[in-house]
Image: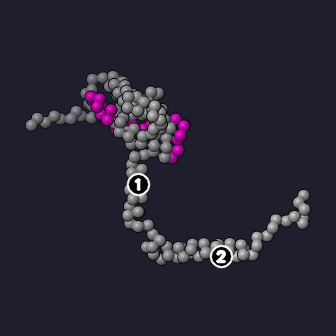
Amino acid sequence: MPDPDQRAPEPDEPEQAATARYLALIRAVHDEWDELESAGDRSVQLSAGALSTIKESVRADARHGAHVQMPPTPAGPFSVSELTLRTLVRRTIDAVPDARALRTSFEYGSDGSSVRSRGLPTRASCRISARLGAPDLPTLADEVRAAVLLACETELGLTDLTVDLHIEDLHDAPEHHEH
């Protein structure tokens, strides 16, 4: 039990006065800022350039998507944007004769997942369109799956990716015009 004669020393009067002046000054700055902001004073607003830069940054971030963790390289860890991952898969599917990419989504491992960051991709669900009259749809699906797996392994080092494929639509073959 503390000894009643051993109380914590009271701050001396000059220190208390200095603290009170400091807190009053901070309150005054906040009050003035709030008044200027309410009145629309441009001195407390972001400049047009700063606001434009922030907006463009947010748009780019939304367009590119979250950061996706990739298998580490000898040089260290790396990530790609969701846009990069989707673009690789879309271009790979479009390069397979008789196939067109429609939509691809990914499932991610739990390591590192957050709002702006995803773990290692574990599953790709690809929806494609097949050329009307393609001779064998199951074989086309196997070709697309193999191409996506090879591209993801070769380009990104993803070796344990599962690729689900759904033929969602049929399209006409593009017409070839001779000049």
| Vertical side of 178 occupied by 36: above or below | below
From the top left corner, tell me how far across and down residue 86 is, in percent.
38, 39
Q: Quadrant of the N terminus?
A: bottom right
- Between 104 and 17, which is closer to the camera in this rendering? 17
Residue of label 1 = 57
Q: Amino acid at mark 1?
A: Ser
Q: Secondary structure at mark 1?
A: helix
Residue drawn at x 72%, y 73% is 16
From the image, state whether disc 2 or disc 1 is nearer to you. 2
| Vertical side of 67 occupied by 155: above or below | above
Residue drawn at x 35%, y 39% is 87
Q: Secondary structure at mark 2?
A: helix
From the top left corner, tell me how far across and down residue 82 is, in percent.
42, 41
From the top left corner, tell me how far across and down residue 95 is, in percent.
28, 31
Q: Residue 173 got which mark?
A: none
Residue drawn at x 54%, y 37% is 111
Residue drawn at x 21%, y 35% is 174
Residue 170 in sight from this viewpoint:
no
Q: Quadrant of the C terminus?
A: top left
Residue of label 2 = 21
From the top left corner, tell me how far across and down residue 158 is, in percent.
44, 30
Q: Is residue 93 magenta?
A: yes
Q: Is residue 139 magenta?
A: no
Q: Quadrant of residue 49?
A: bottom left
Please give left or right for residue 86 compared with residue 12 in the image.
Answer: left
Sequence order check, earlier mark of 2 and 1: 2
- Most distant residue in the left direction: 179
Mark 2: few/some/many CA within 10 Å (<14, 14-19, 20+): few
Residues drawn in magenta: 91-115
| Vertical side of 141 occupied by 88: above or below | below
| Vertical side of 69 occupied by 4: above or below | below
Q: Amino acid at mark 2?
A: Arg
